[in-house]
Structures are given as C-alpha cells and as structure tokens.
Amino acid sequence: MAVVSVKQALGGSLPEGSEVTVRGWVRTRRDSKAGLSFVNLSDGSCFDPIQVVAANTLSNYEDGVKKLTAGASLIATGTLVPSQGKGQGFEIQATDIEVVGLVDDPETYPIQPKAHSMEFLREVAHLRPRTNLFGAVTRMRHTIMMAIHGFLTAEGFSWINTPIITTSDAEGAGDMFRLSTLDLANLPRDDKGAVDFSKDFFGREAFLTVSGQLNVEAYCLAMSKVYTFGPTFRAENSNTPRHLAEFWMVEPEIAFADLNDNADLAERFLKHIFRTVLEERADDMAFFAQRVQPDAITRLEAFVDAPFERVEYTDAIEILKNADKKFEYAVDWGVDLQTEHERYLVEQHFGRPVVVMNYPEAIKAFYMRLNDDGRTVAAMDVLAPGIGEIIGGAQREDRLDVLDRRMRQFGLDPATYGWYRDLRRYGSVPHAGFGLGFERLLCYVCGLANIRDAIPYPRAAGSAEF
RNA sequence: GCCCGAAUAGCUCAGCUGGUUAGAGCACUUGACUGUUAAUCAGGGGGUCGUAGGUUCGAGUCCUACUUCGGGCGCCA
C-alpha cells in the first residue's frame, strides 16, 4: 500500500483505482444519512485537502470516524477514484481509517473552519500552520527560499555561511544583541570599574550578527560571486508591522562589478523569484488573491513584465519637490527619503519598481563607494509598489585610502577593521552587493500586512513567545 | 522611543444618551435531512464583559491607573 501525499493523490499522476494511504489532519467532517461521512484531510503538501469517504461499514465507524473533529489526525487507506462531488478531482474511498490522535476538547480547539483574526492566530503560532492561510504562507516561504538558492546557484554563486556570532560592531547598523556567559549578578570589573569582557566566553565583547556583508566581502574577493543567507538580529525597539528582532536576510556580493551590475542583478533576482512562485505555487497564490490581497497575482505579473525604472537620488529629490502632494517631511537634497517619499515615487510618479541610485554620502554607510562628485556614494535602494524599500545595496569602497578616510569620518577606528582593510590591500577590485529582508519579500508576495505572519515564530521587541 | 485606538462566549462581533435575567453567527452537543464539501434546518449547553480602583441609587457602558493587542511615525531589511 503506497503512502502518498495529498498533493500526489490529487495531482492526477496516479491511476484511478490505485490503492493508496494518506496521512494528515482533519479539516472538516460531514456526515450523510446515506451511511457515510466525508472527511477533508490536509497534510500540508498542497493547498487543497483531499476528501476521504468513510462508509458506515468500516468497523470503527461509530467509535472512530464519528469522533473525528477538526484537528484530529488519521491514516486513511483506500481506493483513489474520481470524485462524484463538485470542486475536487479525486477522493479516497476508504477501506480502513486509523484514528491516530483525537482532539481532546473539540469545543476549544482554536482552529475552526472559519475566518480567524491574524492577531488571534499569532497567539496560537504552534497551531496556525493548520490554517489555509499559514499553510500557504509556509509553502511560499519554502518555495521562495529555494528560488533564491536556485537562482543564485544557476548564476554561479557560492553560498557562504557567515557567522551568527560576531565580535565587530559591523556597520554600526543599529543596536545589537549582546552575547555573554558572564554572571550578570556578579560581573568581573577592570581597574576602572568597567565590565571586564576579557573574562567573557570569547575573551572580548560578542554580539549576534546584524549583517553578514563584511564577512561575505572577503569571500567575494576570492570566489567572485557569493551570497550569505541566514538569520539576522536587530535589537532596535522598532514597533511596526515591518520589523522583527530576528529575521532572515539574503546578501549577494559580486566582484568586478559596479552599481549598475548590482542593480541588474537585483532586477533579475526579484523577477526570477516572482516568476517561480507564479509557476510553482499557483494554488496558494490563487488563495492569496481570493482572500488576502485581490491583486496579489496581477501585481507580481506586472512586476515580472516591467523593466525597473532607474533614477538618480538627485533627480528623485527634484521629482518630489515638484510633486503636488504635501509631504509630512520636507524634501531637500541631503535628506534621506522617508517612506511617504518612496511610496510617492513608486506608486504615483513611476507606477512600477524603481531603483534610486547615488545617495548623499553623509546619510549612507562608511563602506559605500564614494563617487567622483565627492558628495554622493554608489548606494541603491530598490523600491516596489505596495511595500517601498525591498532591497538596499551599494558598490563597496575598494580604495584603501578613501575607506580609511570614510571610517574616520564616521568615528570608526580603521585599526579595528584590520582584516576588512586587508581586502583593499591584496588585490582589491570593484565589487558590489545588496541585502534583501526575506520576510518583507514574503509579505509582499503573499499580501500580508504584518511581518509577524511571515515567519513561523516571530521575535520582536517585547515579544518572544513559543 | 513618540502618538492614536481596542479589549464582551472557544472564535468573529453587536450591545444607542449608564437602567430588570448580556445577544447573534461560527464552533460544540441533540434531533431532522442530505454524495456532502466553510452543507442546510430546529433545539440545547457555554460569558466573574482584560485587571485594579473610582463616580453613581445603579456601570459591559463614564473616569483613572495598569496589562495585553493593534495601527501610524521614527530607526531599518
């Protein structure tokens, strides 16, 4: 008896009349007085559940099948046949149903065949994957992860596993989570009364990473095309639907490349991902379009078809200055673009994805390459309709003297960046890269409004349940 | 971190200007009916109205604090 997934059973590749076994969890059970019950069974392999038809001739019909409620688990064996009912291709005429686990209190089982609020489902994060929505999000998450690895692999990239524990303050990219094994109630002190981190586990201060970029640059200047993709940690007290304290970030880095090469890569990269989900997850996308975001599919299709607009930061400022719209934050050359500015550019002015390039040097990180004009750096942000900034990247400063100057300008001591400076001493080449917040991308694709629904167990300021 | 809003049954919500025993749908349960499919119809059980104070003859309703959740902004991915 072949054990098959619901996806295989519904997929049409198995011949009619096949004897199969499926295993999963009950979504709904409907009884018919004709002497049979219909059990919709889901195993996560695809959006649709399969209907298992259980006749009252089954030996455990009364004390097994009739006790099944939403959430119960079972193993069903039977014949795969074209369904007599509507809305499904195949069903299973059960010859045996083994009830594996009943729901001990059906009345309080949180997942019902009805609409739940996202807030409620966050409180039952361990059970929400059993809903249509989170099942779909979970499959999408996997599909996009694989699409990213697949695209970059096909383009000749190597996946570099940069460290999660770091001892450098990286880019000064915000607050970091301290990692320590010191006894907080009895901290070792030095002569001046400061905490003596030489007694700590690593012999110095350590933190969780806020970016793998600096580490991956070293591998870029050897392997040519690399990327890092893993969990990232930010300790900022951000209280928004777009921030997590723990999220996943993918950061490709390419050698012998400038900002335009970088933008080209970002465009191909995003389009590949969207094309992949449209092809491989049509069932889940149809659900998002139906229940979550009506234009979920059409906007991805538009994204795939439209060439990205590219605009200089300086020109973008002019566009905003000449806009009819009143902005809460004033626009002037030298200020960073606010969310409202980005949305105006993308959604109203251009109406398609935009790459804003070459920002004022004072508002961007020290490692970004100083342009010949002396007042901008080769930074880029990819803005998308409906979300705003989806990708941030830059060509890196590859000239040692300029890098040192920039570090001092930002109050950083070049001496503490010895290995990073070495990359500019030994065969330095122009190189560039970008970072993409994975959960933000997933939100966009699925039409989710809150990033806490894009990761199985969200961690955010003041919130780390499960 | 700043500003705003919300909290009533397991879930989603209604409950008007404070006034007897707090309602509906779903879920659960009983029955009817049915190759059903978020089935349908009829009945039933289920609520210290987030917590603690206060105002009042009387508070789900008004006030204060706290807690939790959500939204907007900032920081960012």
Image: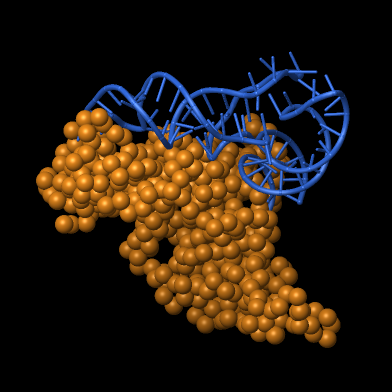
Chain colours: A orange, B blue
**Which is nearer the eye, A82 or A265?**
A82
Count of marks, rendered view: 0
Query: What x and y, as percent, mark residue A201?
Result: 63, 82
Task: Decide if residue A413 is on the left or right side of residue A434.
Answer: right
**Which is nearer the eye, A411 or B70?**
B70
Query: What x and y, as percent, mark residue A231?
Result: 52, 64
Task: Decide if residue A214 is on the left or right side of residue A7.
Answer: right
- Residue under the point 71% across and 81% down: A197
Quarter holding the C terminus of chain A is bottom right
Which of the 4 image quarters holds residue A268?
Answer: bottom left
Residue A448 visible in the snapshot = no
**Which is nearer the eye, B75 or A78?**
A78
**Which is nearer the eye, A24 or B70?**
A24
Residue A115 visible in the snapshot = yes
- Residue under the point 63% across and 41% down: A340
- Residue under the point 18% across and 52% down: A20
Quarter holding the N terminus of chain A is bottom left
Whether A121 is drawn above or below B29: the answer is below
Whether A86 is drawn above or below B16: the answer is below
Query: What x and y, as percent, mark residue A115?
Result: 46, 36
Which of the 4 image quarters holds residue A172?
Answer: bottom right
- Residue under the point 38% across and 39% down: A287
Query: What x and y, as percent, mark residue A385?
Result: 50, 41
Task: Decide if residue A189 is on the left or right side of residue A436.
Answer: right
